[in-house]
Amino acid sequence: MRKTILAVTLLSATALTGCMENQDMQRAIVGAGLGCVAGEIISNGKCVTGAAIGAAGGALLNDM
C-alpha cells in the first residue's frame, strides 16, 4: 500500500513540473522523485535521504 501511495505521489509531482517555468525546480522535483525510488530500492526505506540527494543534484545540474 505504501509503495502505491508513493508511486501516485511521484507521478503527480512529475506531472506538475510541466506547469512550472523554473527549470531548476523541475529538475529538483524529478531528481527528488528518482532519488526516492532509488533509496527505496537500494537501501530499503531510505526514500527521504534519496529524495534529498536527488533534489540537490537536480537543482544544481545545469542543462547539458
Image (tube, rainbow, N blue to C red):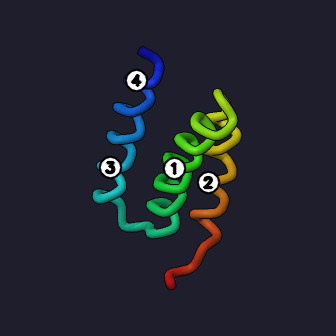
Q: Amino acid at mark 2?
A: Gly
Q: Is residue 52 above or below residue 2?
A: below
Q: Nearer the viewer, residue 5 or 22?
A: 5
Please name which of the two marks, 4 or 3, marks the residue nearer to the observer.
4
Label 1 CA crowd tier, 10 Å (few <14, some 14–19, many 20+) = many
Left or right, residue 21 beside residue 61? left
Say what secondary structure mark 2 lies in.
Answer: helix
Q: Which of the two discs, 3 and 2, labels the residue nearer the N terminus?
A: 3
Q: Amino acid at mark 4?
A: Ile
Quarter of the image for the N terminus: give it.
top left
Rounded to the nearest angstrom, the CA distance separating label 3 from label 2 is 17 Å
Q: Which mark is residue 54?
A: 2
Residue 24 position in % (x across, y down): 52, 67
Q: Amino acid at mark 3?
A: Leu
Q: Which image quadrant is residue 48 in?
A: top right
For disc 3, the marked residue is 16
Q: Nearer the viewer, residue 17 or 35?
A: 35
Rounded to the nearest angstrom, the CA distance separating label 2 from label 4 is 19 Å
Q: Residue at horizontal 36%, vertical 67%?
A: 21
Circles 2, 1 touching at the beta carbon (< 8 Å):
yes
Say what secondary structure mark 3 lies in.
Answer: helix
Q: Which mark is residue 5?
A: 4
Circles 1, 4 touching at the beta carbon (< 8 Å):
no
Say what secondary structure mark 4 lies in.
Answer: helix
Q: Which mark is residue 14?
A: none
Please name which of the two marks, 3 or 2, marks the residue nearer to the observer.
2
Rounded to the nearest angstrom, the CA distance separating label 1 from label 4 is 15 Å
Q: Amino acid at mark 1?
A: Leu
Residue 62 position in % (x across, y down): 57, 79
Q: Which of the two discs, 2 and 4, labels the residue nearer the N terminus?
A: 4
Please name which of the two marks, 1 or 3, marks the residue nearer to the observer.
1
For disc 1, the marked residue is 34
